[in-house]
Amino acid sequence: MIKRFIIAFILLVLVCGGIVGWNLFRDHAIQQFFANMPVAKVTVSSSTVEPIDWTPGIEAIGTVNASQGVDLTVEAAGIIKEILFKANEQTKAGAVLIQLDDAVQQADLAAGKTQAALDKVTLNRAAELQKRGVGTDVNVDSARAAAEASASQVAKLQAVVDQKQLRAPFAGTMGIPKIDIGQYLAPGTIVATIQDLQTMRADFSIPEQQLDLLKIGEPVKFGVNSDDMPFKGTITGIEPKVDPTSRLVAVRAEITNPEGKLSPGQFIQAQVVLPEEKDVLAIAQTSVIASLYGDYVYVVRPAKKADAPAEAAKPAKADDAAATDAAKPAAEAETTEALEVHQVFIKTGRRSNGLVEILDGIAAGDQIVTAGQNRLSNGTPVTIDNTINPANPAQPQPAAK
């Protein structure tokens, strides 16, 4: 009985020992496999940090309006007799746009002119009689008063006739007519709009912290997006009061619009161009990665060389020529310096035109990754391929030395 127990115990020890030994051997083999497995290189694009000529700017969003633009209305009531304009037609200042029925007013004006002419003849006759000593001063004064009253009445009737016409207050582009011939118009009814599209104004707002950077006459660039700003203008007005609700300052700029590409009411992006600065470290915004711990970039540096095994240092034998020839490609590949990336936290400053100013963290001459960061971690080996580099369009030329 005891002998059977001993045999069973020995078998149990052997089985348990085998299981434990197998697990230890497997864990060691896995550890050795991953320790000796080469890390795959990641292909990235990069650029070298160099001082540049930095043109800072203040970016904002605004609305475009015509420098002169109104909704046209009539002063007097009446029936529309003629419409003398068309949609999108260029009109001159003072041109007649609408003619209302003025037959009654024209008749009154003709009667007034006739009376004025008669009163003028009477005045001339009274003056001639006074010179001959026949007429009195009273007759002359009465004739003069009647002539002046008649002339005033003619001016009044002429003004009434003029109110039956709608004239362009300034040169501009006419809008779509909102009336028809024969329609009765009441004073204040909007007939159409007229806009001077040659010169536009843009209204936008900036934070109060940047108010001291603005000056009347500073240049401003405009565009429908931040990548294309073909329109240029200058600041013509700065609101002296800060909005207490939004803490923004209203700014107005004037834009030349000779081709009429901008329309009143259009959304637009603005960038106030500030004086140029020399030797500023700036990199493409695509290079900067934001995290909870701060902004950082990946800097490309030479990889640390591992110690070569002792056997690798032994010279090859003469009869190993074939093995030596097979190892030549590997030796040639090793002549290229191995690279790896390191995570470096930076302190950023101003941003403009796809670039961000670097205040601390990296220095001129550092090579940073501009694309492919999503596959990187600290110490990842990399290869550089700048055939397609998204940072190239945003990179300005280095500062002239």
Image: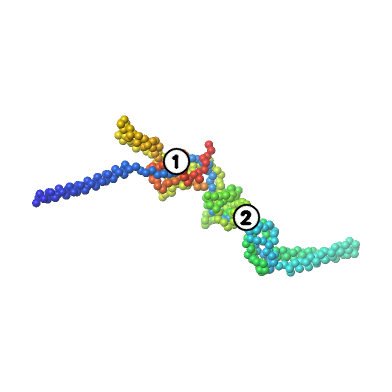
Task: Return the x and y of residue 239 as percentages of the image width and height.
Answer: 58, 53
Mark 2 residue type:
Leu
In the image, is residue 276 above or below residue 201?
above
Q: Which one is nearer the viewer's eye here, 401 or 240?
A: 401
Q: Which one is nearer the viewer's eye here, 308 or 280?
A: 308
Q: Which one is nearer the viewer's eye here, 127 or 373?
A: 373
> At numbered mark 2, what does the secondary structure look like: helix, strand or loop?
loop
Residue 367 image label = 1
Asked whether, in this view, residue 13 is left or right of residue 120, the answer is: left
- Estimate how packed mark 1 is, as few (under 14), some (14 to 19) or many (20 or more) residues with alpha carbons within 10 Å: some
Task: Return the x and y of residue 217 as percentages of the image width and height.
Answer: 60, 48
Task: Return the x and y of residue 318 as percentages of the image width and height.
Answer: 31, 30
Mark 1 residue type:
Gln
**Where on the picture, by quarter, is residue 361?**
top left
The residue beneath circle 2 is 197
> At numbered mark 1, what does the secondary structure look like: helix, strand or loop?
strand
Task: Return the x and y of residue 261 as percentages of the image width and height.
Answer: 59, 54
Asked whether, in this view, residue 299 is left or right of residue 21, the answer is: right
Specify how the rendered protein is coloured: rainbow
| CA distance for labels 1 and 2 | 49 Å
Residue 232 image label = none
Residue at (55% x, 55% y) in the render? 267
The furthest residue to the top? 318
Residue at (43% x, 46% y) in the render? 372
Residue at (41% x, 48% y) in the render? 374
